[in-house]
Amino acid sequence: MKVKDTSTSSKIMNVIIYTVMVLSLLACLLPFVYMLALSLSTPQAIIQRKVSFWPVGWDTQAYRQIFTYPNFFRAYGNTLFYTIFGTFIALVMTILFAYPLSKTCLRGHKALTKMVVISMYFAGGMIPNYLLVSALNLTGTRLAMLIPFAINQFNLIILVNFFKALPIEIEEAALIDGLGYFRILPRIILPLSTAAIATIGLYYAVFFWNDWFNGLIYLNTRQYPVMLFLRNIVNGTMVLGNSSSASTDTASLSISVKSAVIITSTLPIIILYPFLQKYFVKGLTVGSIKG
Amino acid sequence: MRRKVDAAIGKTPFSKHFQRFWQLYVMLILPVAYFIIFKYLPMFGNVLAFRRFRPGMSLYGTEWVGFRYFKMFLGDTAFWQAFRNTITLSLLNLALTFPLPIIFAVLLNEVQHWAFKKIVQTVSYMPRFISTVVVIAIMGELFSPSSGLINNLRSTFGLGPIYFMNEPEYFRPLYIFSGAWQYTGWTAIIYLASISGINSELYEAAEIDGANRFQQVFSVTLPSILPTIMVMLILEVGRLLSLGFEKILLMYTPSNSAVSDIIDTLVYRVGLANQNYSYATAIGLFSGIIGVFLVAGANALSKRLTGDGIY
Amino acid sequence: MKKALVIVLVALMAFSAFASPVAEVKEEGPLKFSMYYSDNATLPFKESWLAVQEATKSVNAEIQWEIIPIADYSTKVSLALNTQTNAPDVILYQTTTGENASLALNGAIVPISDYSEWTPCWNAMVEKYGMEDDVELLKLQDGKRYYLPSLTDVPFYDGGLILREDFLKAEGFDAPKTFDDLYAILKAYKAKHPESYPLTVLAGPRVLYRMTMPSFGLSIGKNGSGGSRVLSWNYDEMKYFPAAISEEFKAYLAFFGKLYAEGLLDPEMAEPIDGSIWSRKMATGAAIATWAYYDQIGGVTAASTIEGFKLQMYPALAGPAGAHHQQKNRTGSGIMFPAATAKRADFEQIVRAVDKMFFSEENSKLWCIGVEGTTYTMDGDKIVYADNIKKAAEGIYKYMQLEYGCGSDVTQMVWVNAREMTKYDENYAQINKAVEAMGNVIQYIPPTPKFDDMEAEEAAMLMTPLADKLEVWCNAFLTGKKSLDKDWNAYVAEMKGLQIEKYCDLYNTNL
């Protein structure tokens, strides 16, 4: 690292740097703190505009309320299902494609690469995609959330580049030992690729966790993921709370309930990603753009 | 080493080649089938733009109608408004959000306190993982006229509430800044990696020349990461038109539609919601073709400047 | 690797189990079918509702309810009908005006009039209330009718201007007769409570528009009658005119724009105000006037802590075109069968079951007043509601909706005026009598043109941008972002550029 510089210009610079950094830190965190504060405040405090970054009145009613909605649990379970199986299928498919694609000696390698690249240039639009999924009779089934998104070309290219960068000697030694590629891939290549796989695995998981639009157009209401549940609350097509008691509290309670849904639906991703962070920074920089 | 092996294999007859590599070819079966079905069939599905769709019949339409739908949308002011909105929002978005990760990365690199640097980094990636629905929901609460933080702040200064999420003039700022909030930290990773690859001798030489830290940023850091900046810029230009459709659909209200209606939301409304499938496909195809030109142009530019294409 | 492949295959097989399509036909056991239900945020659907349970039981069916938020309903219905792959067997709350006409003519919907021997209950109701002519109007160009509409013997005034009567009395105002009377009342309230917005709206401006526009001689927008969105019916000349660019509309905007500019109209009106916020505004005195339904008065009153709080519904206000309310026909949205349902082996049973479930004498009573002995008892030929219902703070009507699923316009298909009146108080009956005495307050809904499928497609395409533009400009004029004096001509030019006149001709030539 550089030698410590104690000049005035350096001090000014430090002030600027730390100010900017602290501000960006706050900008990233405060919205969540605000949501947390809202979700734990009493409805009255929210309506009287008293809540900022600390709960006023400390009330867990919103959380207790959402745990009484069967629809919320079903949506949450659906999202878990889509994320776990979606990520699994996507990883299997992407690995199955990336590994052969990293072997430039294969016949048709060029054509296959072209096939991938062309599909990045030019994709079928929203309507053709929708019509295809429905022609395959996938609409209204959970598979509609999984199968059409099995391979993302960017993730594929990251993995291909990663595989290409692996030392070829180990593989050749294994081939000489009489192992076929079916065994080499899981036993030798995958253990060497945990960083890259964790990275694209995280990308896929985040995609499936956050998806709502495909749920809206492809699924029936019982299969809706939690993000679509949240969207329906946000745009007011669905009202939470017991609307049969037309009390004035329901309106204000709905704000804290909304915040509680935001918190509970975001938490798993926020908790998951710091553990994978060491992998994905490495994975992203290794595989990015042009590996 | 690898070259040599490949070259040797390349000359072997196919039967022998296949005998050695058949397992790799077997692996390809599923993914290639997937690509053909889910990437290429929809691509050909674009012929629907020239054919008439009839409910319950073929997804490729039933009869040729030529450029009927193209003529229709080219004469449709709603299309041109969406087109203008797409271009405007894309360019504004690029101009305002492109420099942010560079600045952020350069400044973060200058932080000498290791633990603090780590914390800032970890926290700044976080928004990237948040669903657009959650981002919009949080914005909705922050900017709510009746209970949101921002309007609470305004009311303490005696100002009236503003309906940020509904006023057309706030749509673009909100879209762009929420995007910056989500992606600045994330995109900065690439620049940080690039900065960490700079030879430290360059800084030492600059220091001997009497450059202070501020001057070093301009004389060493920025010039060194310029190629990365160029590549990123080209990439961004290539996907200029692919705005966050889902986010805009969530932010779309009738009253801000004059600025928030982009080509993708128009396709959604005209096609899926109002069931003019062929018409919407024609619009989608048109913008898809512009997209191809942008990507191809960016790629060619990249080849000329850096000697290497992006794809 | 083999192991991994086996795992993949097993996993795929497990998925395909999830993927198995909707209920297969079985010979024995209850009849199984799926049904789309349009869910309203103010009345969330419950499968446990008494009416739902009993009606289902009466036809020995097992129904898979597909509960869809109303905002997504038309999109989901359109997707289902267009592709037919994920279509439900039955769709509630549909008509064949607008886009559905082209779907029907393209064969996506069962022409239910061809199967009239399977709908004996519906036929009997049509005959009973003498609605043969009304039903005849619903036939499309090919002479077929594609849905079973809901039936109303006499349309009634179930919603309108709702005002705080206690304020009127305290300030010495008479009941408002004209829009100018209303203006004076709002103005007086604003003077007393400067922080209030005296007139608020429920569920976005569409309720306000559809209930007030007829007094100005038009009916446009998302809920405009007739489904053309930008055209209205000229009741004298019996044809459509481009109302969105008419002087009538300009006068309408001028009036409500004035309310907005003077802080008399809730600025949150453009957003979909949900029921609970609306109810809070009314209950706390942040607003004193609204256009809404009579059955909502009870809930708001129960929630209010204001001394002497009293809401009253008033007959339609007189505007430039006289005093009119939202247009109504004796037929309403009803039940539709996607073409795919006709391919089921038990199609006949499904049609018969649906017919009985919604239109039989017993079940039409069930959807309205519930089960005898549970929700009501008979005292001679008078209906007496159970005590808990009579005492409910929200009022009988609303309480029965929320608790039993009775009286929802999605599922109740037969509306008999005399029976409906039993759910309301004396006050309501008097308002309705007053409205009836005024004569022709509730006009008929203009006839739907009979397009062939090409014309239907063209009309649908012309409509989308016109309706979008109207919505944007209407909002801008109301909120003063655009000036009626300066920008009106630009707006008219824009609508003409979008061929509103051609669109109007298309309607008039196909009547």
Image (cartoon, coloured by chain):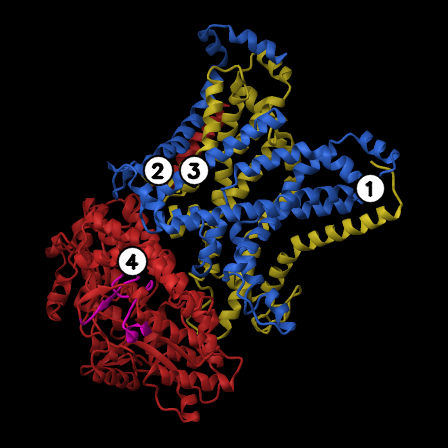
Chain colours: A yellow, B blue, C red
**Which callout, 3 or 1, points at the residue further toward the start of the chain?**
1
Image position of C337 with respect to C388: above or below: above
Disc 1 packing (10 Å; few <14; some 14–19; many ≥20): many
Q: Which residue is mark 4?
A: C500
| Amino acid type at image mark 4 | Ile
Give how far apart the Cα atoms at labels 3 and 1 are: 46 Å
Give how far apart the Cα atoms at labels 1 and 2 are: 57 Å
| Amino acid type at image mark 1 | Arg
| Amino acid type at image mark 3 | Gly
Asked if marks 4 and 3 fall on the same chain, the answer is: no
**Membership of C230 in magenta stretch:** yes
Chain for numbered disc 1: B
In the rendered structure, which segment of residues is drawn in magenta?
C210-236
Disc 4 packing (10 Å; few <14; some 14–19; many ≥20): many
**What residue is at 89 percent from the left and 45 percent from the top?**
A6
Q: Quadrant of residue A288?
A: top right
Image position of B82 with respect to C173: above or below: above
Mark number, residue B213: 1
Disc 2 packing (10 Å; few <14; some 14–19; many ≥20): many
Q: Which residue is mark 2?
A: A132
**Membership of A103 in magenta stretch:** no
Viewer-nearest of labels 1 and 2? Answer: 1
The chief SS type of the magenta part is loop
Mark number, residue A156: none
Q: Total label count?
A: 4
